[in-house]
């Protein structure tokens, strides 16, 4: 005979209702109790009947993680990849499944499956496709936006503090004596691109430093593009002594460009990245960067979906997550 929920309850010394709740809504069960139940289930090789649960709860147990096409593939994206890892692990803990797809690929027949109540909630990473976003609202599918915000009252957003992060970057360089600081932006979504640009301009003003638009350039999305843009900065008549980059990929390109031009980082040229991705500790020198807690961002995204599904009130329509500067070896006192 197959193992039943009662067998698990007896072995874990809890009620059947508690076992059921541990699988359907694990966040509502004491962590120690949940661990005991999961160990009992594993020992008995018990698997919950997902189809039966879906019929009772009217939920599929599935979430979708949809990444903006230009940020794909998400697995190798240094920012969204870390968020996705957190989203998946949090989803698994809640005994749910996750579909992962880019928005350009889902504008096909698979989109109809998505909106036929095959998913209980959607995480839009980066800029959402407007048609898909409106359709999810129309269908009443809970959703949350990561690194994007709209003025739609039905949408929830999770953002990093781009303005605060840029202020920390500029203040750090100013404390090191840098006065002519360049800015290397990326071809991100217009929303993030403008937030980080405006954050830099505002931070320079607050530090009483002159912002020179001649040394604020866009470096594309990839290392090679960032290298070419940094080279143009360093060939200016009066080049910057440091550069703040809108993400870590651009910062890696900036360091490579400086090195190939015979400059030492950080002795001759300081570089700061943004996002504090895995690139920071594998680069040489290790990269100073602005950290966003990507693991917590992923956890909050899933928690936001679950809260909406259960009809509870979420914390706030838009959550701005704190940023912190992580000082490593790519910044040093200005010598010019």
Image: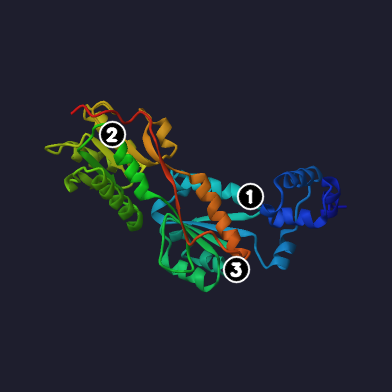
Q: Using a 10 Å C-alpha cutoff, classify the residue at mark 3 as few (fewer than 14 neighbours), some (14 to 19) or many (20 or more).
A: some
Give the labeled residue for mark 3.
117
Tell which tag, 3 or 2, sits nearer the viewer: 2
Tell which tag, 2 or 1, sits nearer the viewer: 2
> Would residue 87 be found to the left or right of residue 5 on screen?
left
Who is closer to the viewer here, 12 or 221?
12
CA–CA distance between discs 3 and 2? 54 Å
> Would residue 289 be found to the left or right of residue 123 on screen?
left
Q: Position of residue 180 (x, y in %)?
A: 20, 38
Q: Position of residue 293 (x, y in %)?
A: 48, 44
> Would residue 213 be found to the left or right of residue 292 on screen?
left
Q: Using a 10 Å C-alpha cutoff, classify the residue at mark 1 as few (fewer than 14 neighbours), some (14 to 19) or many (20 or more).
A: few
Up/down of 169 relative to 135, above or below: above
Q: State the residue at coordinates (75%, 63%).
A: 52
Looking at marks 1 and 3 on the same chain, the residue that comes earlier in the sequence is marked by 1
> Would residue 10 be found to the left or right of residue 186 on screen?
right
Give the labeled residue for mark 2.
175
Looking at marks 2 and 1 on the same chain, the residue that comes earlier in the sequence is marked by 1
Q: Quadrant of residue 282?
A: top left
Up/down of 200 relative to 55, above or below: above
Looking at marks 3 and 2 on the same chain, the residue that comes earlier in the sequence is marked by 3
Q: Secondary structure at mark 2?
A: helix
Q: Position of residue 101 (x, y in %)?
A: 50, 56
Give the labeled residue for mark 1.
92
Tell which tag, 1 or 3, sits nearer the viewer: 1
CB-based contact (under 8 Å), mark 2 and mark 1: no
CA–CA distance between discs 1 and 3? 20 Å
Q: Extreme left residue here?
A: 237
Q: Secondary structure at mark 3?
A: helix
Q: State the residue at coordinates (29%, 41%).
A: 170
How many numbered circles are shown?
A: 3
């Amino acid at each position: 005979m197959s193992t039943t929920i009662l067998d698990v309850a007896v072995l874990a010394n809890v009620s059947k209702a508690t076992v059921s709740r541990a699988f359907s809504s694990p966040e509502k069960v004491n962590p120690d109790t949940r661990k005991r139940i999961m160990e009992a289930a594993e020992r008995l090789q018990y698997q919950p009947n997902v189809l039966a649960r879906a019929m009772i709860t009217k939920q599929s147990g599935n979430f979708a993680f949809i990444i903006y096409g230009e940020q794909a593939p998400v697995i190798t994206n240094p920012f969204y990849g870390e968020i996705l890892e957190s989203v998946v692990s949090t989803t698994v803990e809640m005994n749910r499944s996750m579909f992962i797809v880019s928005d350009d690929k889902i504008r096909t027949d698979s989109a109809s499956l998505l909106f036929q109540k095959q998913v209980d909630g959607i995480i839009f990473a980066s800029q959402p496709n407007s048609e898909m976003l409106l359709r999810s609202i129309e269908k009443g599918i809970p959703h949350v936006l990561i690194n994007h915000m709209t003025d739609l009252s039905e949408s929830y957003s999770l953002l990093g503090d781009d303005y605060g992060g840029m202020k920390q970057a500029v203040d750090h360089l100013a404390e090191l004596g840098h006065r002519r600081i360049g800015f290397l932006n990326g071809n991100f979504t217009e929303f993030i691109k403008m937030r980080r640009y405006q954050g830099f301009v505002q931070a320079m003003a607050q530090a009483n430093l002159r912002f020179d638009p001649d040394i604020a350039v866009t470096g594309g999305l990839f290392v090679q593009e960032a290298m070419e843009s940094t080279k143009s900065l360093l060939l200016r008549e009066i080049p910057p002594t440091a550069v703040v980059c809108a993400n870590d990929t651009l910062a890696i390109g900036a360091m490579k460009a400086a090195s190939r031009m015979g400059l030492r980082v950080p002795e001759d040229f300081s570089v700061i990245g943004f996002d504090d991705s895995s690139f920071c500790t594998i680069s040489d020198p290790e990269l100073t960067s602005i950290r966003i807690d990507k693991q917590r961002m992923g956890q909050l995204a899933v928690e936001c979906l679950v809260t909406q599904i259960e009809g509870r009130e979420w914390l706030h329509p838009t959550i701005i997550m704190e940023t912190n500067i992580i000082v490593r070896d790519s910044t040093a006192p200005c010598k010019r």
